[in-house]
Amino acid sequence: MDAVGRALGVHRVLEPVGVLPQAALRLDPDPAIGPDEVRVSVQRLNLDAASFRQLSESCGGDGAAVRAAVLDIVAARGKMQNPVTGSGGMLIGTVAAVGPGSPLGLRVGDRVATLVSLTLTPLRITDGLARWDGRSEQVPAEGTAVLFARSVAAVLPDDLPDPVALAVLDVCGAPAVTDRVVRRSGARSVLVLGAAGKSGCLSLAAARAAGATALTGLVRDEREAAALRAAGLADRVVVADATDPLAVAAAVGEPAAVTVVCVDAPGAEHGAVLATAQGGTVVFFSMATSFAQAALGAEGMAADVTMLIGNGYAPGHAEAALELYRRSAGVRALLDARVPA
Ligand code: NAP
């Protein structure tokens, strides 16, 4: 295998041979590491919101069934990748072994968050997830994970509780892409769908810091609207079902230059496009986004908008998101409410 393939973890792909780990059906989660790999003792997983919602809804909210489903997926696939949403999440743990050729700069004993998706991280769970009730995205877990030469990991900050750091780092790509789009376009008006959620509130704070002056947060109901107003992150808070395009457009009114989709439910594509001005940009951070719905929907609306997939990685994204959390009382209020005690 060539060096590029090895650095990307192709040697861990069991099926189908030749694809990258993210696209694999099955990975080899053997905790014995190669010379350029790192083994992490897992402490906690963070299932991404779209995956957890799908699992929870398909199990009728039965926590034991959700736990069994996650265990089945990891046992079958050697990684945590929800077969319906295709998404994963990330994890925190302690570095247990470092291959002599690993370029990641980690040391045994470092407490780290993996900033590459669980969908490409070889994972073995050894405690049956006995300490998890199956009712929240954060999963106390024991087991092992493997990082490749080209993986990304961050040493956990000392000043924040682990569950908070995990929640922020899981969605740190959202404020990063929002910052980049607002700065590059010079956009003043930004709309965030799912604005009271974790990625939503961070995106609002990032848009403000990047110079946007007219921020609209769209939320599902009056309870979330009250929380978002109290947080003070948006200039305007509107209530609508993000999956109802006409309701979204009516609630938003004047279309925004930039729209960031941070809901965790499918079906927000058309509302997002409809609420975005001609020549504007829609960032689809949500893992529940359908490429076909977005592309064909925009075509059908004759909408001249640029549509971006919210890449989970950008240089400096982790530290920037942690800084937004530290600096913004509004972000802390909204995000802390979603983090398990
Ligand atoms: P979150 O904290 O659960 O926030 C999602 C928000 O959307 C919640 O406030 C939720 O309201 C709201 N919402 C759901 N359905 C809605 C609807 N029909 N109308 C209006 N609001 C609605 O989720 P998150 O952790 O920020 O994640 C958001 C999305 O980003 C997920 O799809 C997740 O999978 C994705 N994600 C992407 C990446 C990436 O790299 N691109 C990385 C991590 C996560 P309720 O709480 O009332 O349901």
Image (cartoon, rainbow, N blue to C red):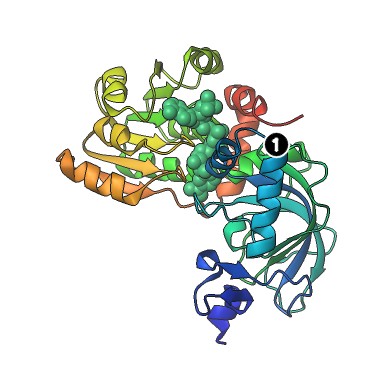
User: Who's the residue at 71% across and 73% down the image?
Assistant: 37
User: Observer-nearest residue: 33 or 270?
Assistant: 270
Residue drawn at the location 53% of the way across and 55% of the way down: 83
- Badge 1: how crowded within 10 Å, few (<14), some, or many (20+)? some
- Residue designated by label 1: 63
The image position of residue 109, as x and y in percent, is 85, 59
Residue 190 as seen in the image, left or right of residue 64? left
Residue placed farthest to the bottom in the image?
Answer: 1
Q: Is residue 59 above or below residue 307?
A: above
* Quadrant of res 181: top left
The image shows residue 116 at horizontal and vertical percentages of 59, 58
On screen, residue 280 versus residue 17, left or right, reads left
Instruction: Indicate the amino acid at tag 1.
Output: Gly
212 on left or right of 257 = right
Query: What residue is drawn where x is 42% and y is 23%?
Result: 217
The quadrant holding residue 237 is top left
Helix, strand or loop status at disc 1 = helix
Location of the N terminus by quadrant is bottom right
